[in-house]
Image (cartoon, rainbow, N blue to C red):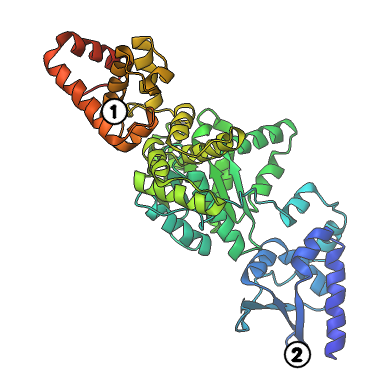
Amino acid sequence: MQQSHKALWDNCLRLIRQNVTEQIFKTWFEPIVFEKYDEANTTLLVQVPSPYVYEYLEQHFVKLMGWALNQSFKANVRLTYRLVTDKTHNLTQDVESDRPADIGPQIGTTLANKAPTVLDAAVAQLDPQLDAKKTFDNYIEGDSNKLPRTIGLSIAEHPGKSTFNPFFIFGPSGCGKTHLINAIGVQCKKIYPQKRVLYVSARLFQVQYTDAQRQNTVNDFINFYQTIDVLIVDDVQEWATAEKTVATFFHVFDHLFRLGKQIILASDRPPVDLEWLKDRMLTRFSCGLIAELEKPNVQLCKAILESKCRRDGLKIPAEVIQFIAETANGSVRDLEGVLNSLMAHSIVYNSNLDMRLAERVMKRAVKIDNHPLTIDDILEKVCLHYNVSQQNIFSKSRKRDYVLARQISMYLAQKFTKMPTSRIGQLIGGRDHSTVIHSCSAVEQRLKVDKAFTEELNSIETSFKLKHN
């Protein structure tokens, strides 16, 4: 008898298959396993691979399934799901369907006449648009990001099930916002492969909405976004002049929020500083958790650089890493850019990854405000002032002008850089630390007694456009 009931279930699947796209059928219906049918109570028990599949079937296909069951079993069948909650320990849970008690015959007829749409295919298969390289494994934790990182990991493990919804992250450019929200999405997809996770920039969302308006498909656009389980939107501050886009996103947001779907937003400022937000959106953006990402300090920058070097097999001297960490203005993006530039220069010009190369790269790659000068900056100004070349300063010549320019360069390098005297000597003609100490002492003694020399040195320092104490 059970075999005939299994045949009735197979016929039910055949009817469903005729009313959905092939991709939807394979994704959501093929994994269902027939367990048993209780003829006395007209109750069908089927097994589904996860609680998520059960939730999705109930939300999107309950009427279709009810109609197919009634057509196949010729009875008002009560459907019960057996959910696999733990595959390792073979744990399951039985849950009864919430489908309407009576499904009229018109449902099947309507669906059978409906041609598959682009939306049907999009619902079944979705590229999350995540950067697989931006994960929690390579998101280094520090004081500036500990709270957002911890909360983000919790959300990835339990999306939509906590009070952290929506999760609003803000912070300055380069502090790691995009990496963090990507990591949440990647981790969530890893734990819940069936969930529909989508990362989208605010700009792309706006472009998609504008295209939907032009093609008169706004309803399809909204319907698509309302199928998402974890929606991640980056750079929402860019909607400042997009009133219609914001109004449409409000409807998407409201729908997902009411269904308990996870929403993650990122911006360069907190919600209260987004002047274009109306009160109703401000309230919704702020009702979950707002977390600030600060610029990483030198210690965290150093840890990020060391981690990237280990991961990419790079060998960079500790003093170079320290210099980059101190100079990159707390920007993770700048750190990565400098490392990439260092490697490119080293390979193309066959040069060593040393401080001189690091200084040159930093000067071109990073905007440095009120930061200690590099050796190259100092040599450039001194050479210009005394009309000599760097080769003259590096030489062993004892010509008076060369010696003076050499001593002043060493003095200014000690004053405006954090390098040890041994390193300054190496970069200025390969001298030892005692030569640097002697040169600095000679300049300091002359400053005490020579007013004209003091004014001359002040003129050079003024050209650096730095403020001195």
- Using residue 4 as the reference point, say whether residue 244 is left or right of it: left
Q: Is residue 309 above or below residue 90?
A: above
Percent of width and height locating residue 125? 73, 55
Q: Is residue 239 above or below residue 299?
A: above
**Neighbourhood count class around disc 2 (C-alpha, 10 Å): few under 14, some 14–19, many 20 upward:** few
Residue furthest to the left in view is 449
- The label on residue 416 is 1
Question: Looking at this view, is 257 or 32 the one in front?
Answer: 32
Q: Is residue 363 above or below residue 95?
A: above
Percent of width and height locating residue 402? 33, 16
Q: Name the element at disc 1.
A: helix
Percent of width and height locating residue 249? 57, 41
Marks 1 and 2, the one that precedes in the sequence: 2
- Using residue 406 as the reference point, say whether residue 65 is left or right of it: right
Q: Name the element at disc 2.
A: loop
- Quadrant position of the N terminus in the picture: bottom right
Percent of width and height locating residue 211? 70, 33
- Callout in the foreground (1, 2): 1
The residue positioned 45% from the left and 36% from the top of the image is: 173
- Using residue 234 as the reference point, say whether residue 303 is left or right of it: left
The residue positioned 34% from the left and 31% from the top of the image is: 431
- The Cα–Cα distance between marks 1 and 2, rounded to whole angstroms, is 90 Å
Q: Which residue is mark 2?
A: 40
Question: Residue 36 sits in which quadrant?
Answer: bottom right
Question: Looking at this view, is 58 or 306 the one in front?
Answer: 306
Mark 1: amino acid = Phe
Residue 291 visible? The answer is no
Residue 123 visible? The answer is yes
- The label on residue 386 is none
